[in-house]
Amino acid sequence: MESFITILETVLTYIVQFSVTVLEFFGVFILVYTAVRCFISWTRKDHFVRLDLAQGIALALEFKLGGEVLRTVITRDRDELYILGAIILLRGVLTFLIHWEIKNEEKALEKSSADQLRKTGPGADRPGKKRLKSAPANPAAKKHRDA
């Protein structure tokens, strides 16, 4: 019976090590792919570069964090477990900060889009089209405008 349990532990160790390697590879691949894609977008003056880069980094960190969590399954030494815990905590904090940055970047992009729309008006991006007067958002504003 003990030999069967030993075999199961060995199989589990190999499966976990392989899975951790695959998750780490996915994280690195996503990070490199995102960096190259965002560099190309940056050279083209794309306004969404920061948002795309932050989202790619967050996704890569999620894969790397998954690998670290999985690695705790086969950790036997207490010191190694402390190190893994610190890595998981650090990557979790980084993921939280990146998601916070993504939210702020999305708000900034929405604000700049709204400001640009106010400056140019609806239909300004279509040459040859006359700009239409926008309707008021609420009836009270219409009464005030008509008075």
Image (cartoon, rainbow, N blue to C red):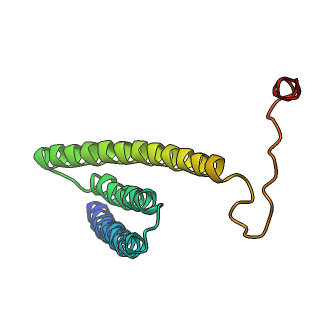
Between residue 66 and residue 106, name the one nearer to us: 106
Q: What residue is at 16 percent from the left and 43 percent from the top?
A: 82
Looking at the image, residue 29 lies above or below residue 102: below
Between residue 96 and residue 67, name the one nearer to us: 96
Looking at the image, residue 74 lies above or below residue 108: below
Q: What residue is at 21 percent from the left and 49 percent from the top?
A: 84
Q: Residue furthest front?
A: 147
Please provide percent x and percent y for residue 96: 37, 42
Between residue 63 and residue 118, name the one nearer to us: 118
Q: Residue furthest left?
A: 79
Q: What residue is at 80 percent from the left and 60 percent from the top?
A: 130
Please provide percent x and percent y for residue 57: 36, 59
Question: Which quadrant of the figure has residue 86?
Answer: top left
Looking at the image, residue 139 lies above or below residue 55: above
Please provide percent x and percent y for residue 55: 44, 57
Question: Which quadrant of the figure has residue 3?
Answer: bottom left
Looking at the image, residue 97 lies above or below residue 42: above
Q: Quadrant of the N terminus?
A: bottom left
Between residue 9 and residue 90, name the one nearer to us: 90
Please provide percent x and percent y for residue 36: 35, 75
Q: Is residue 8 left or right of residue 129?
A: left
